[in-house]
Amino acid sequence: MAGNWKMFKTIAETTQFIVDFLPLVAGVTHADIVIAPPFTAVADAARKTAGSSVAVAAQDLHWEKQGAFTGEVSAAMLAEAGARYVIIGHSERRHIFGETDDQVFQKTRAALGAGLTPIVCVGELLAEREAGATNQVLARQFGGSVGGLTLQEFTAIIIAYEPVWAIGTGKVATPEIAAEAHRFIRSEASAKFGKDTANALRILYGGSVKPDNVRGLMAQPEIDGTLVGGASLDAKSFAAIVNF
Ligand code: 13P
């Protein structure tokens, strides 16, 4: 169960969240819990969650180890700061910052190289769904973003299905629609990496997940977890989601 904070929370606000959140999820063993604060709060969040059930993710990275890339952060820098996961190819990166499938692929390999667990995002736009192109888009994103990984690399990633029309809109995908997309992604994984690997792949659903709709989503065997935006910013709300 992962919370993507996007460009919200200072270090002080992150600290307050952790103080409030840790007691609410102490002893949770049914799920891995991840929070993804902005870069500036990653190191502090990692220190303050050390030894707890909560791990820290970054929201992006650059694929090169170092270099003249003003404004960018490498996988090794994130790992050193204490991140254990990194979100890659979020729809806001793809659509606002023009990130391509190939960049997502390179970022995924760089993350794996530094021992981070990538959470690779895919998902269709509303117009693509309405045009009946959802599976085509998912196949293209899957193929371009993670299809070129080795089998060993692929077994170490998590995929998040986030239909763009459900992100920040309050329009959650029905559990059936989400499960159908997850099934399709798993079938792509099976075709490329084999049935056992596909069955072991964790696929998270993201898009307007809230405390009152998480149970229905998690009741779908195809849905292994959730990637939560807005509702992960409040400790009680995110704890309610984790403890669905
Ligand atoms: P919301 O939960 O705010 O719709 O955001 C989803 C998301 O983009 C998580 O990465």
Image: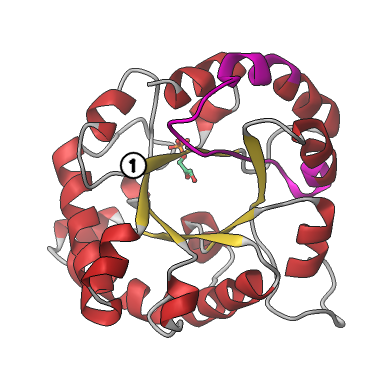
Left or right of 7: which side holds 163? left
Task: Specify few, some or many for label 1: CA neighbours under 10 Å numbering under 14, 14-19, or 20 or more.
Answer: some
The one nearer the camera, 56 or 177, is 56
* Residue 74 visible in this rendered orientation of the protein: no
* Residue 172 visible in this rendered orientation of the protein: yes
The one nearer the camera, 18 or 164, is 18
| Magenta stretch: includes residue 170 | no
When the figure is inspected, residue 170 is found, relative to residue 72, above or below; the finding is: above
Quadrant of the rendering where the C terminus is positioned: top left
| Magenta stretch: includes residue 20 | yes
The one nearer the camera, 24 or 122, is 24
Q: Is label 1 within 8 A of ligand 1 (CB to nearest ligand atom)?
A: yes
How was this image coloured?
secondary structure
Q: Report the amino acid beneath label 1.
A: Ala
Q: Which residue is drawn at 45% across and 82% down?
A: 149
Name the residue that disc number 1 marks. 166
Q: Which residue is drawn at 33% across and 27% down?
A: 214
Q: Residue at x 23, y 27 (%)?
A: 216
Residue 145: give x, y in percent of width and height: 44, 75
Residue 231: give x, y in percent of width and height: 50, 26
Q: Which residue is drawn at 67% across and 66% down?
A: 115
SS of the residue under disc 1: helix
When the figure is inspected, residue 137 is found, relative to residue 176, above or below; the finding is: below
Q: Quadrant of residue 185?
A: bottom left
When the figure is inspected, residue 85 is found, relative to residue 21, above or below; the finding is: below
Q: Quadrant of residue 122?
A: bottom left
Q: Which span is picked out in magenta?
A: 19-42
